[in-house]
Image: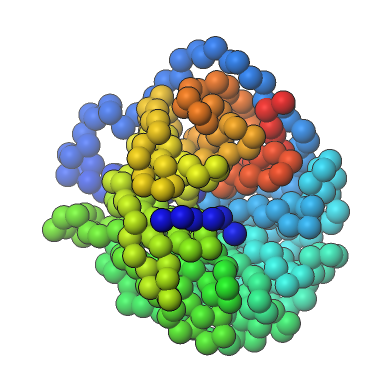
Amino acid sequence: MKLTLKRKFIAVLALTSLLGACSLFKNERRFEPAKLADIKQSIVVNTVWQTSIGSGGSAGFAPVYADNSIFAATPDGTVVRVNAENGNIAWSTKLDTKLTSGVGVGDGLVIVTDRKAKAYALNAQTGEKVWDTELSTISTMPPIAGFGKVIVRADDFRVQAFDSKDGKLHWSFVRTNPILSLKTNSRMALINNAVIVAVPTGKLVSLNLNDGTVNWEIHSASAKGPSDIDSVTDVVGQPLVFNDGVCTSSYQGNITCYSIKNSRLTPVWFEPFSSAVGLGYDNNIIYGASIDGTVAAFSLANGQIAWSDQTLINRGLTNPVVYQNYLYVGDLAGLIHVYDTKSGSLVGRFSAGSSKDIVSPLLPTDKGVVVQNGSGTLMLIRVN
């Protein structure tokens, strides 16, 4: 298949704690985060700029790069637009509410959601509120906007489409919920007047933006055992969308790539790889960070493993991203680890300014990698 290209550590701890009551994980040390050995740093990671934008962090908050700006939000109600060149804040709006997710950027709007199950649309140029609307329930997945619609997937897994101009509900899509599901770092994607979104039990669907009808549906991950916990599986991160295909990662599942032809999807390859975060991509190589801390590189064409590293076992890794031949991945101690993309060697380590867990996905841009740390600081870093 020829494809041309046109987070975080989830609440698994709650599941393991539940199982721990049954002594399954009692006195287990194999789940402890790996201690970091000193490495020979052959590169230097520089902070291009950093700015405090608010307070706190959560998996539902993902910065967005658009119009030479970084748009971001924090749980305390702060929404900002930051100049991507120098980190200067173009505008900062403090909403009188506690946010649960953000941001979606498109159609001249910046979208966030709150604990009162409402979505808010701000003017992307000024930060002024344009409209707000009620949701079916709270949403901890970042919204997405474009093609005249604002799309929100609520925590009851209902997908709702609102008019970008006034917030009026256009359509709603819902499936029967499983007994158990994951609160994952999952995100949606827009392409060709459709939204691609994960729904429970390892499924990914493409919905027509006009009316919410299903264009196609794939079962990217399947249950692996008889118990309810064994059956917990979900597509995680943001799907990699190509002109003629899509690649996904899943918890208790696989990395899978499909070809798309006439609205029909055909699996091209899959590799067993349980992840809580999305995939990275660069130069025909897909990068994954597994739930156990393995970082690996796969050929886009056939899934062959180029390299794999287990230095960061159980360190609650973020999504991996690439900038100029280096792979960046964050961890639960607020550190950024840097790999050489060709050799898979760990060549650098960098503190993101806080010891708190990095839960927002890393964001690659043409200027470097944007990091939103657990303390509400936004920064741009890169290897020079």
Residue pictured at 54% horizontal, 26% vertical: 340
| Quarter-of-image position of residue 64 | bottom right
The correct choice, above or below, for 59 with respect to 141 in the image is: above
Query: Residue 311 versus residue 14: which sits nearer the camera?
Result: 311
Residue occupying image coordinates x 66% and y 83%: 163
Q: Is residue 201 visible?
A: yes
Corner quadrant of residue 124: bottom right
125 and 260: which one is in front? 260
Residue 294, horizontal then vertical, whole percent: 38, 34
- Residue 3 position, x and y percent, is 49, 55
The quadrant of the rendering that contains the C terminus is top right
Residue 41 sits above or below residue 354 on the image: above
107 relative position to 234: left or right: right
Residue at the image point whose x is 46% and y is 73% from the top = 206
Is residue 96 visible from the viewing direction of this image? no
Q: Quadrant of the N terminus?
A: bottom left
When the figure is inspected, residue 4 is found, relative to residue 328, above or below; the finding is below
Residue appearing at x 57%, y 73% in the figure: 192
